[in-house]
Image (spheres, rainbow, N blue to C red):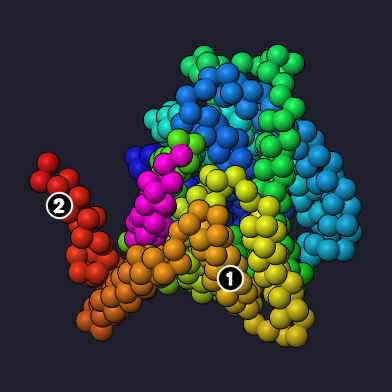
């Protein structure tokens, strides 16, 4: 997974540089506001896969093959139905979007519409692909998952290179070609799953179970509400920014989302390996082990993200300058604030998985969806009263990040028995201490070295030392420290 991540991050960063150079800030801003949701479909897909993966991993923990076949068939039917509903919804929404809501130059409306309908096609394919994605995760087949991820990144790189040299409208070409990528990956994943996993048998009539349909549909419905509210906020923030400030600032917002997306992959890889463990332990009734894995997952996944996030925050102006050459206005601040939001949310990632593992998510989904939706409303009124563009992120930090974490921790206590005091002691306090230590040590490089590669390397080394010192002193429990030392001695 980390080899895949290294390749995909390098490819994605270079791809973004090519796109920004070939499309220009204005067209890239249009793609961010219209077709940029394609990048968010990966998030929507992984969130929706939680439902199928939860039931699949739960059955895997119990070792019931017939139950897994039932879950796969029911999930496939439900996701085909959801994909059709989503497609109809996107078609209806397109009318008001292109008739007053979007602030796009008149001569680029036609290109924007093509990108939008390509997005609609990609959305359908991504949703249909969800059960297959969940099967692979339930079996913890990270090798195949990594190969597909690298292949998908290389396809996107080839598309970006083609856009540099094509004589046609680059925005239209990019939108059309990006819609083909999910079709290719869906086909490959479908063939692989049917050849390697016994539960991947399409026979909905034979494996129909009314009680199980109700359970999965209820769980998927609440989970889908949470996913849609999250996606609405990410896209809604772009729409609000576009309405008040135009497409140039959308480019800055899009770059910030890309940076945070690539950075979060370091923690996502760990979570992909950990989530099936949490759910399987729930399926086997081993809740003590589930809670232990949850607390350690929250802490160590955040440490992994901090390792890369803190030096990047400190040296953001220089990194963006050498990466993009021409940096759009507000990009530096947007990137820093987006990373802060990502780190805050990462602290409760495993706790959210534990809540999903136990299955009763109705009220959690309602409150979490409310916290997801509020930032768009707050940002809109902030801009209406003349606030600066950075107010896009103030509600994201306070409501989405901190408020969302409070909801997750509260329901992890209520539904899974995870102590709030234990979370504060074992996750929040060590993470805050490590963050402060890394910031102080990394920032000190600014006083001794001028802006250069040397200062960037010095900052990375100093923050690494800060993290290691934090881990050895207060960042790990005695049990965790002993296990780490045992692994090192091996």
Q: In the rendered picture of this protein, how many numbered marks are placed on residues?
A: 2
Residue at 58% across, 28% down: 132
Is 292 included in the stretch rendered in magenta? yes
Q: Where is residue 223 in the image (x, y as percent from the top left)?
A: 66, 47
Q: Can residue 42 be seen in this view?
A: no
Q: Position of residue 268 (x, y in %)?
A: 45, 49
Mark 1 nearby-residue class (10 Å; few <14, some 14–19, many ≥20): some
Residue carrying label 2 = 485
Q: Above or below — where is 268 with respect to 105?
A: above
Left or right: 448 as drawn, with respect to 83 = left
Residue at 70% across, 14% down: 206
Viewer-nearest residue: 180 or 68: 68
Viewer-nearest residue: 307 or 242: 307
Secondary structure type for disc 2: helix
Q: How far apart are marks 2 and 1 (CA)?
A: 36 Å
Q: Above or below — where is 200 with respect to 440?
A: above
- Badge 2 or badge 1: first in the primary sequence: 1
């Amino acid at each position: 997974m980390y080899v895949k991540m290294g390749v995909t991050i390098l490819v994605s960063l270079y791809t973004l540089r090519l796109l920004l150079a070939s499309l220009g800030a204005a067209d890239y801003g249009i793609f961010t506001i219209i077709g940029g949701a394609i990048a968010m479909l990966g998030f929507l897909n992984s969130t929706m896969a939680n439902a199928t993966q939860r039931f699949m991993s739960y059955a895997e923990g119990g070792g019931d093959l017939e139950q897994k076949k039932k879950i796969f068939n029911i999930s496939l039917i439900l996701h085909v139905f959801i994909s059709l509903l989503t497609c109809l919804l996107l078609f209806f929404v397109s009318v008001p979007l292109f008739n007053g809501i979007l602030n796009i130059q008149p001569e680029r409306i036609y290109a924007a519409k093509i990108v939008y309908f390509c997005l609609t096609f990609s959305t359908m394919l991504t949703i249909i692909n969800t059960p297959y994605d969940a099967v692979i995760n339930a079996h913890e087949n990270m090798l195949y998952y990594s190969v597909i991820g690298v292949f998908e990144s290389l396809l996107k790189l080839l598309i970006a290179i083609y856009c540099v040299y094509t004589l046609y409208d680059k925005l239209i070409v990019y939108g059309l070609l990006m819609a083909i990528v999910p079709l290719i990956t869906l086909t490959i994943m479908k063939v692989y799953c049917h050849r390697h996993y016994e539960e991947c048998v399409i026979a909905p009539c034979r494996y129909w179970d009314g009680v199980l349909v109700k359970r999965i549909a209820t769980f998927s419905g609440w989970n889908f509400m949470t996913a849609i509210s999250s996606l609405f906020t990410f896209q809604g923030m772009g729409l609000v920014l576009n309405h008040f400030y135009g497409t140039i600032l959308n480019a800055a917002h899009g770059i910030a989302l890309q940076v945070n997306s690539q950075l979060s992959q370091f923690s996502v890889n760990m979570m992909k390996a950990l989530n099936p463990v949490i759910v399987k332990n729930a399926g086997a009734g081993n809740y003590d082990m589930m809670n232990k894995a949850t607390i350690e997952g929250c802490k160590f996944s955040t440490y992994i993200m901090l390792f890369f996030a803190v030096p990047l925050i400190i040296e953001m102006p220089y990194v963006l300058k050498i990466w993009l050459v021409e940096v759009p206005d507000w990009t530096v601040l947007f990137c820093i604030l987006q990373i802060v939001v990502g780190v805050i949310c990462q602290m409760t990632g495993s706790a959210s998985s534990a809540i999903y593992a136990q299955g009763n998510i109705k009220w959690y989904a309602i409150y979490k969806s409310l916290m997801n939706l509020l930032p768009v409303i707050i940002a809109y009124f902030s801009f209406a009263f003349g606030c600066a563009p950075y107010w896009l992120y103030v509600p994201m930090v306070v409501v989405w990040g901190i408020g969302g974490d409070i909801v997750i921790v509260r329901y992890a206590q209520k539904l899974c028995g995870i102590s709030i005091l234990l979370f504060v002691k074992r996750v929040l306090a060590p993470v805050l201490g490590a963050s402060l230590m890394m910031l102080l040590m990394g920032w000190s490089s600014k006083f001794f070295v001028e802006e250069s590669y040397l200062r960037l390397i010095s900052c990375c080394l100093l923050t690494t030392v800060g993290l290691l010192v934090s881990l050895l002193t207060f960042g790990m429990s005695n049990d965790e420290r002993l296990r780490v030392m045992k692994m090192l001695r091996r």
